[in-house]
Amino acid sequence: MASAHGKQHDYHIIDPSPWPVLTSLGAFVLMFGLVSLFRWVHGAEFMLFGANFSTPWIFVVGLVVTLYAMGAWWADTIKEGHEGHHTRVVSLHLRYGMIMFIASEVMFFVAWFWAFFDASLFSAEAIQASRVEFTGGQWPPKGLEVLDPWHLPLYNTVILLLSGTTVTWAHHALLHNDRKGMIQGLVLTVLLGVLFSFVQAYEYMHAPFAFSESIYGATFFMATGFHGFHVLVGTIFLLVCLIRAAAGDFSPKAHFGFEAAAWYWHFVDVVWLFLFFSIYIWGGWGAPLAHG
């Protein structure tokens, strides 16, 4: 009788969970709050149903709810893995899910590259559409200084390439059951990710052009800014893996969480290489360089 009630398949039927609904609700409030935040920053009203929603607090509430639901959801997933529910089939599907997520992220960045190349290769049409006066019908816009690609952008390129090496070292150490090496590799990767973010923030603060000045600035900051956001997310992802590794999680045969983080980090590396060569080098070719 006991065997009749035992598990007869490799799939895991999860228990009813509040996290999908709570995550959706938090994401909706977050996006609504983002609009209200922008209106509040610009000192404008955001009227809806006779009330002014121009406040930063809606965004804060949405962000807190979303982060809490995501953390709790992932904690349940980790717990399921510890309980042995991540069978061969379940692990395979988790990998498929991560691959599809990264594929969606690729298409997300394709949109920003498309916008940049469309504006640069057909600058006259882009300038006319943007109604900007001082561009002069050329790319980069006439009179605009660009960032020197062989200064901070090259520095950040080296940082990310090194971080790709250290996360691979950590993965290799894990496969050989070297927990100390894995932790050391993760620590270095997280530190390099933080350093990249600080360098990019410094670069933004000293950029010789603004987001709203031209189509060049808009496409530049959208593409590089979203990449910077992904670096921040990847750094947090790896930091969580570091905490789990220090707590004794992961083994050579069961480490999908770390593997997913490594895949994501390598994706971030590859996107940056495309950004560096296409936007920093090719996109600013022939324009005067900003110094200082």
Image (cartoon, grey):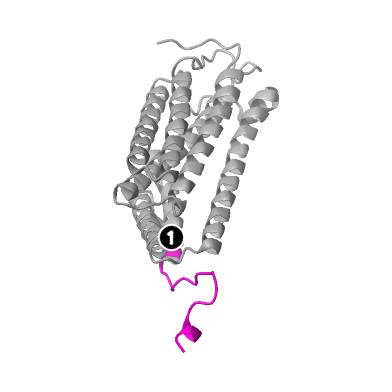
Q: On the image, which quarter does residue 140 sit in?
A: top right
**Residue 82 rendering spot, x and y as whole percentages:** 38, 62
Q: Residue furthest bottom?
A: 1
**Residue 276 belongs to the span the image colors magenta:** no
**Residue 196 rendering spot, x and y as whole percentages:** 40, 29
Q: Which residue is mark 1?
A: 23
Q: Mark 1 belongs to which amino acid?
A: Thr
Q: On the image, which quarter does residue 15 sit in?
A: bottom left
> Considering the numbered disc 1 on the image, is that residue within a helix, a strand or a loop?
helix
**Residue 252 rendering spot, x and y as whole percentages:** 44, 50
- How many other residues sit within 10 Å of disc 1, few (<14), some (14-19) or many (≥20)? many
Q: Residue at x 61, y 27 (%)?
A: 131
Prevailing secondary structure class for the magenta stretch in the rendered image: loop
Residue 273 in view in this figure: yes
In magenta, the rendered stretch is 1-20
Q: Residue at x 37, y 56 (%)?
A: 71
Q: Residue at x 38, y 54 (%)?
A: 62
Relative to 11, say whether 220 is above or below: above
Q: Residue furthest left?
A: 247
Relative to 204, say whether 50 is above or below: below
**Residue 223 rendering spot, x and y as whole percentages:** 54, 33
